[in-house]
Image: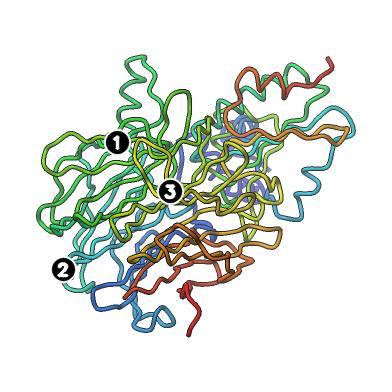
Amino acid sequence: MRIPAVLLLLLAALAAAAASAPLVAPLGAGDVPALLEPPAHGQRIVMVWALDCVYCEPNMRALAALQGAHPGAVELVTVATDHIAERARISARLAAAGMQAYRAYAYADAAPDRLDFLIDPDWGGETPRTLVIRADGSRLALSGRLTAQQLERVAPAGP
Amino acid sequence: MLRLLALLLLVLPPLLAAHEGEHPSAAPATALGASAAFDGDGRLWLADVVDGRVRLRQSGDLGRHFGPATRVNAEAEDIDHAGENRPKLTFGPAGEIYVSWSQRRPKKWSSFVRFARSLDGGRHFSAPITVHRDRGEATHSFDALAVDGAGRPLIAWIDARDHLAAMQAGQAYAGLAIYYAWSDDRGASFQAERRLADHSCECCRLALVRDPSGAVRALFRAVSGSDVRDHAYALLPTDGSAAQASRATFSGWQVAACPEQGPGLAFGAGGVAHAVWYEASEGPAIWYGQLDPGHAPRHMLKLGTAGARHADVASSGRRVWVAWNQLSADGYTLMLRSSGDGGISFGAPRTLARASVAASTPQLLVHEGQAYVAWNTAAGFQLLPAERAP
């Protein structure tokens, strides 16, 4: 079978684009326990964000830098509170923020605010919301773009 | 080959979106922004969004049945009706129907405020107009609509132009701004917009209400100092005088975040400004209070904490009602409290309805001294009387 050159070119472009556009998985109520389960070691940082939120992308970049500084100790996951039907916008925004490397979800529950409550009942829905879930079961939750001082609290204790 | 083509068709749309900017998506089933209002004859009207059009329907039996729908905008638009954004609906003194909405634009965070009117009881609507003269591709969103004592429609919205201008000049500008405009010709056109206030929060709805003197006042989340997100209160001048916003809540909640929860405002006996708002300075909380600009509100009452969201308030004489959504692991509960003494004390919270599917912000309406809560859920629209039947 011969593949037309134009299609090959298109495929090459697609492969490059695919590397830069993160896949976004749906998050339903049944997926929340696994998201919040303490990791085997180190800590998981779950950053909840929204397309409308102007403070979210700087926060993502800061957390990605923190993860890069502690690659073995920090797992970074993003969750968009926008419905998964907005996947194209969500994926584009994550790509623009350089978040290709991180697991990404978007809300896909019939009752979206219920997901807010299941993720963190002591949260009014403001974004960004940064949750730190440590292997020892302890947690930290912070609203807003993290200050330098807050980033220190979020960073893992060890090297 | 066919497999390759099929793969291409599957992956191409999101990738194109990633490269060209932000294409509109199909509206998710959880976008439920709608507005209900009673007209002068006691008929209930409901504006919601279907397939890029504002749909208007009316009911003669308090929302149990609705008549045929009118499309306000013939041409589909990307109408923002998620979160606290919803089409707005109000009436003029001669039966005019005024409708406004926020239209999302392809550029990130860009939106225009749109408006249409009907002078024949909703049979026909004017071609939609963009309310603001500014055509910069920037946020003009969270429109709010009210009619003043002279019968003029006023629209206020959150506007990014000053933020962008400051950024281009290399200067900092906290939050966005509030702009407003009014019409002197029953909505055929709007006066050039004016700035109401600098430094508003970016994504919280405004409350825009006519006060007992006939002037229109706004309550909105502001950004002051270092990311303190309390509320400001301002009269919308229509006589050329300068607008003056006053700080109205004093929680000191300091956060660089988008709460996406704006305040509610209603005037009661003696011109008391009843307000509800959200803040999380010591954990999430929704509050009731009576505005005393420049000072902390009077008779403050914490209505709810964890899981309490999106409150609204209404008043008639000395009666005051507050409603909000209470979240739990099961979904939404619509809660209500009422006061018979002008908001000095409130009865115990009562459950009005529950939903296990998406529910929008409750909207309190008053008709002939009785309060109703308009609640749009993915299972359908409900109008719930605030008081039990006698």
- Residue located beneath label 2 in the image: B119
Residue at position x 43%, y 71% from top?
A: B372
Mark 3: few/some/many CA within 10 Å (<14, 14-19, 20+): many
First reached walking from the N terminus: tag 2 or tag 1: 2
Residue A74: percent from left, percent from top:
78, 26
Residue A11: percent from left, percent from top:
61, 36
Is the residue at mark 3 from the same chain as the one at mark 1?
yes
- Residue located beneath label 3 in the image: B263
Q: Could you tell me the amino acid type at mark 3? A: Pro
In what element is the residue under mark 2? loop
Is the residue at mark 2 from the same chain as the one at mark 1?
yes
Residue B166 picture quarter: top left
First reached walking from the N terminus: tag 3 or tag 1: 1
How many numbered circles are shown? 3
Q: CA distance from mark 2 to mark 3?
A: 31 Å
Residue at position x 28%, y 61% from top?
A: B73
In what element is the residue under mark 1? loop
Mark 1 — on which chain does it sit? B
Residue at position x 44%, y 44% from top?
A: B204
Q: Is residue A84 toward the left or the right of residue B59 in the image?
A: right
First reached walking from the N terminus: tag 2 or tag 3: 2
Q: Is residue B275 toward the left or the right of residue B4 in the image?
A: left
Mark 1: few/some/many CA within 10 Å (<14, 14-19, 20+): many
Mark 2 — on which chain does it sit? B
Q: Which mark is residue B245?
A: 1
- A90 lies above or below B275: above
Q: Could you tell me the amino acid type at mark 2? A: Leu
Is the residue at mark 2 from the same chain as the one at mark 3?
yes
Residue at position x 48%, y 75% from top?
A: B387
Q: CA distance from mark 2 to mark 1?
A: 34 Å
